[in-house]
Image (cartoon, rainbow, N blue to C red):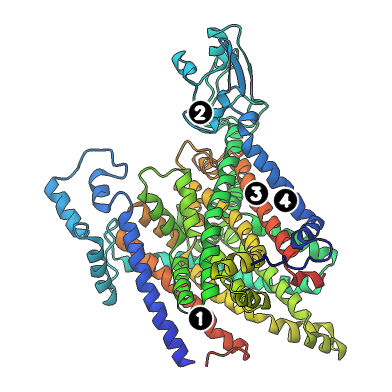
Amino acid sequence: MLPYTFRRVLIGLFTLLLISFVVYGLIRAMPGDPASLAAWGQEGAGDLTVSAREFEEMRRAYGLDKHWTLAYFEWLGKIVRGDLGISLYNHRPVKDMILDALGPTLLLSVTSLSLAYVLSIPLGLYSAHRSGKLDERALSGFLYVLYSFPSYVVAVFLLLLLSVELKLLPLTGMRGKDFETLSGLARGWDLLKHMVLPVACYTYGSLAYYTRFIRSNLVEVSRQNYILTARAKGLPERTVLFKHAFRNSLIPLVTLMGLSLPTLLSGSVILENIFAWPGMGRVFYQALYTRDYPLIMGVTLMFSVLVLAGTLLADLLYPLVDPRISHA
Amino acid sequence: MPEPPEASPHTRGGFWRDAWRRFRRDRPALGALIFILLLILVALGAPFLVGTKPIVCSYKGSLYFPFLEYYFQGVENSIFFQDRFRGVFPVNLKKKDPASWALWPLVYQDPYRRVEAGEWPGEAGNKTYQPPSLRHLFGTDEQGRDVFARVIFGTRVALLVGLVSMGIAGVIGLLVGALAGYFGGKVDLTLSRLIELSMSIPTLVLILALLSIVERPGIYHLMAVMGLTRWESMARLTRGEFLRLKERDFVLAARALGAPWHRIVFRHILPNALAPALATLTFGIASAILIESALSFLGLGAPPPTPSWGRILASWRANDSCWWLAIFPGLAIFLSVLAYNLIGDGFQEATDPRSRSGA
């Protein structure tokens, strides 16, 4: 077990190194660099607002005068010492910007993931239990359609209906304009109202997916001989379903949880953009837009660590839920 | 060496015929297939449905097909250039040659520009932000362009993006997966790392960075880039299939006959691994359509004049009381994604031998 973990972590570190190298090269290949954006403005059409000497200084400060491989190793050296650098655009430490954005993203993703699990397990059990019956087929069909509905289209439709037409919910943002003047309870209510639509858009897709996933796993498990045995023994259907079938269908669910770890923190670029939610997805989009190299690198590094950690975690959890699997 | 006989025929004619029989029984999947075929027709024949260029016209004694310009940009016939048509046909045809005649598309509107007043004799120009009416079936946008025309032409973009990008991704994925699965060992280790690496880089960074290498990224660049970044799941699946199949007796037999590796990989194993790969490809098309519209929605995808569904949807944000700017492109995206998913599932059901004994 331990040597296995050690080997996996080592491979993971090597992969991280490769990813960060490739991404660094890629973002340096993007047209427009932070120095010229600062000097000419976002449109790149206006006159130079700084002198040529200042421009050169800026390029040096941003590390643009060096070849990108050299700049990469400088960046790497800082990372090893735990320094993610300073945002070129906001002039704030990248670490602080990421930490600031994590809160709002976690608020959405944890709420939505918990909702998805809490709702999908009973739904999945129910539809496996009623498999083939009319109500189950209607439910499954509905969930299937829901699963195919792109989240940003749903976001736009919901905004159109609830915010624009009915004016029930606020359009965008995390807080109302008068948030500062509100009392504690009213603040919570305000936040909740702003959260409803983003959480709904985050949740419905994974809810539909998990339910289908749990149902198909249960149906698969139900064909096994030990389920037949349990039924033959005359155990009540409830016991068969919960004790025998459901427990054994948990293994793939654990993998799924591990794989969903990165999405917890990464946020959604497009949804956070639509709802103007100040989370990771929005930070990342803005970093790309302003060519904020240290910020892009910091966020990418975090995403990659999470993806790798998620897969590793899922693999390590396997033997715990299923003793037949072992990494010895 | 004589060709070995084909694999023993199944009862009632072959694997694919069998799969088709099964697929046909799946009503939603069949409906989705018909819907997609219809979309392909719409995409191919878009300039016949809506456009400002005649399908065929007789002008100064010869026949011309100006609608072809919607397929190949910049092939305008030089006579229309010399006679200063400037892309406006109805008025100019009559003015410059009273004997001319033309066959028009069903709807006289353009996906790239607004129709000006007097362009069509006696008709007013397009106004901005018009709600749906008989004249503008899906309303007009912020520039007065007809949304129906844009949605119809958007079909071309969506279908093309899906098919081309997944075609590229499919070839790369199959190749990488086949080599990794068949050869195993060091080849597998290297290629698996490559797959892992490419999966861990955020798609958005990868797509944007690759797009930025070209000077003026167009829709074809976007397709190529998406093809280059979305092959991992295909490769993983093919690798698994190859690992499973290469131990089979028919592979051993081929090897014993002295068949070279490329023959074994492409002629013997690949056809057997194709069915699950094709299902994955269908889901890939759905997600490619999604990504393209999402990128265009964020203003990062197809460049401005391109009538992409995502771009129309994005124009709703500037004036959010115009519901028609959201509903029609949104439904178009949703329905095509749903249809591709249904086809993929139906195909999987129809070709997966495990689903045969059950239900």
| Image location of residue B3, percent across then percent down | 67, 65
Q: Chain of mark 2?
A: B
Tell me how far mark 3 sits from mark 2, CA to CA: 26 Å
Residue A295, above or below B133: below
Q: Is residue A308 visible?
A: yes
Foreground tag (4 vs 1)? 4
Residue at numbered disc 2: B113
SS for callout 4: helix
Q: Assess disc 2: are there few (<14), some (14-19) or many (≥20) residues with their C-alpha within 10 Å of its C-alpha.
A: some
Q: What mark, if any, has residue A299 been given in the picture?
A: none
Residue at numbered disc 1: A313
Q: Is residue A190 visible?
A: no
Same-chain status of marks 4 and 1 = no
| Image location of residue B294, percent across then percent down | 52, 51
Residue at numbered disc 3: B336
Contact between marks 2 and 4 (CB within 8 A): the answer is: no
Residue at numbered disc 4: B32
Q: Assess disc 4: are there few (<14), some (14-19) or many (≥20) residues with their C-alpha within 10 Å of its C-alpha.
A: many
SS for callout 3: helix
| Image location of residue A66, percent across then percent down | 19, 60
**N-term mark: 3 or 2:** 2
- Looking at the rendered structure, the kind of residue marked 3 is Ser
- Looking at the rendered structure, the kind of residue marked 4 is Ala
- Looking at the rendered structure, the kind of residue marked 2 is Arg
Q: Chain of mark 3?
A: B
SS for callout 1: helix
- Looking at the rendered structure, the kind of residue marked 1 is Leu
Tell me how far mark 2 sits from mark 1, CA to CA: 53 Å
Tell me how far mark 3 sits from mark 4, CA to CA: 9 Å
